Amino acid sequence: MKLKKFFSSNIREISLIIVMIALSLFIEIRSGGNFFTLENISDMFTETAVLAITAVGMMMVIITSGIDLSIGSIMALGAMVGGTILKNNQAVPGVVIILVSIAVGIVCGFINGTLVAKLKILPIIATLGMMNIYRGLTYLVANGSWVKQQEMGTKFLSIATGKFLGINNLIVIAIVVYIIAAFFLNKTRTGRKIYAVGNSEESARVSGIKTDRTLIMVYTILGAVAGLGGILYVCKYGVAQGETCTGYEMNVIAACVLGGVSINGGTGRVQGVLLGAVLLGILNNAMPLIHVSSFWQEAIRGLIILLSIIANSLIQRNVEMKALRRRNI
């Protein structure tokens, strides 16, 4: 009975794991044994780390029935500010640069949250407008130039290449972020308020939850992880420019949707988002490996996201129908 309850409550995550195993085996066969190599697996998880970090923030926003299309621009702005500081003075510690980028993200996220919570602008409209504003600010900070690898210094770039206990630093940071997020959402009263707002903002307000404060908080958290993700992205690839992370918001939203986060709000789990990010990472790693045309890669990603949304809708409808039957009984 307990086993049945475990499978029913974790059906989404179990399904994702099965899909990931089947897909990995298929890729391993098609690639002639090049997928399950230690180097490739390590590279894949390192590439996925930034996506996984930013997906945590997007998950919280989507749980409240919101969306943030400006996340890629926030990442770029935070990264460009940090990169410009390094360009002018490589002696600045890497931790300070990371904190500056996070601070930029926090300010951007707070502005987005205020527009949504206080001015009651639809999240998709508010963040679409701010996406262009933040991107414009990124171009202004860049001033038409790039921050190149040699201008950042090897000490800063070693953050992305260094290891802790044999594990790449980016993966370690992602693990820490997920542990904190899981504790915050599952074990704190504030985390439960986020789900309550997503299920019904009006009901949450009537029950005494300060919904405006909660909305501003989740957008600010998203801004913080976007700032962190942006500077780590630049640290990994060794270049900051105005076009950094253009279109990245679609990858983050896709990771959330694949992980079972409902676009309608109120539903989503940290472990699901992590699996969704890893599944997207497997796809991004595998398609060039098995020589899938670049023209087809976007189409395949789009198809998988569409199928995931359909699966989410069917699972959610099934859960609601079961709950309705129990109520009738």
Image (cartoon, rainbow, N blue to C red):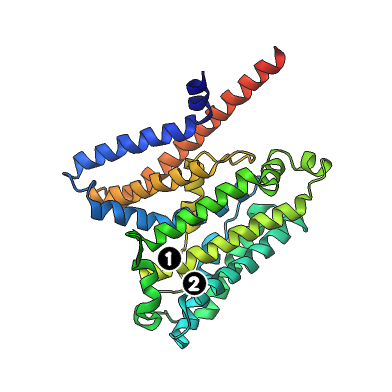
Disc 1: which residue: 233
Report how far apart the C-alphas of labels 1 and 2 lie in the structure.
8 Å
- Is label 1 in contact with label 2 (beta carbons under 8 Å)? yes
Q: Residue at x 44, y 84 (%)?
A: 87
Residue 161 numbered tag: none
Number of numbered tags placed on the structure image? 2
Query: At numbered mark 2, what does the secondary structure look like: helix, strand or loop?
Result: helix
- Split into 4 quadrants, where in the image is the C terminus? top right
Q: Quadrant of residue 205?
A: top right
Q: Residue at x 39, y 63 (%)?
A: 169
The answer to whether 69 is drawn above or below residue 276 in the figure is below
Residue 79 numbered tag: 2
Q: Residue at x 61, y 20 (%)?
A: 322
Coordinates of residue 59 in the picture (x, y in percent): 57, 48
Answer whether residue 244 is visible to the viewer in this image: no
Query: At numbered mark 1, what does the secondary structure look like: helix, strand or loop?
Result: helix
Answer whether residue 164 is visible to the viewer in this image: yes
Q: Earlier in the sequence, mark 1 or mark 2?
A: 2
